[in-house]
Amino acid sequence: VMSETPLPDRRESVTHRVTIGTCKIYLTVGFYDTEKTSVGEVFIALEKTGAERRWMMDEIARLASKLIQRGASLDEVSEMWLGTKAEIGGPVQGDDRIKNCTSVLDYVARHLLVNYCGRDELAHVKKESI
């Protein structure tokens, strides 16, 4: 049985807003530390989409957060979503480094891997170009 490492009651977070196709996505990343280096939770909110799709993203993000809090690496969790295909996908607006994705989860994976796991090879725009 894996033990859970709870996040502090008051914690730092960053919310990224992007548009994929015509859908606005809000990705919130919560951290264990004030330096914003150790990710402990992920929230994915979709705007102007059906209730079932919003519910599904909520549940996927909650499961991912629980996995991270129980010892799975952010890299491992994010890799599961890389390359997934879904109805919402295509050009990404609002992210300096990720410019295209095949699904919301593919975008989230790329964003997390590039920004918090050092996986620059997954970025469409290299860090030195921005």
Image (spheres, rainbow, N blue to C red):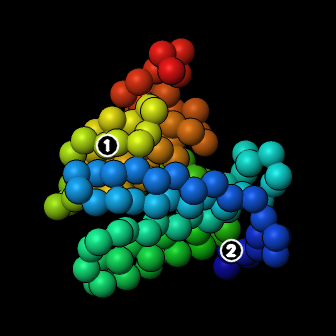
Crowdedness near tag 1: few (<14), some (14–19) or many (≥20) residues, C-alpha within 10 Å:
many
Report which quarter residue 13 is drawn in: bottom right
Give the residue pinned by disc 2: 2
- In the drawing, does residue 86 fall left or right of residue 77? left
- In the drawing, does residue 77 fall left or right of residue 8? left
Q: Residue at x 63, y 54 (%)?
A: 14
Judging from the image, what secondary structure is the residue with disc 1 in?
A: strand
Callout 2 amino acid: Met
Q: Which of 73 and 108 is in front in this view?
A: 108
Marker count (numbered): 2
Mark 1 vs mark 2: which is more N-terminal?
Answer: 2
Q: Residue at x 44, y 76 (%)?
A: 58
Q: Which mark is residue 92?
A: 1
Callout 1 amino acid: Val
Q: Which residue is drawn at 41% across and 42% down?
A: 94
Residue 120 drawn above or below residue 109: above
Res 129 visible:
yes
Q: Residue at x 68, y 74 (%)?
A: 2
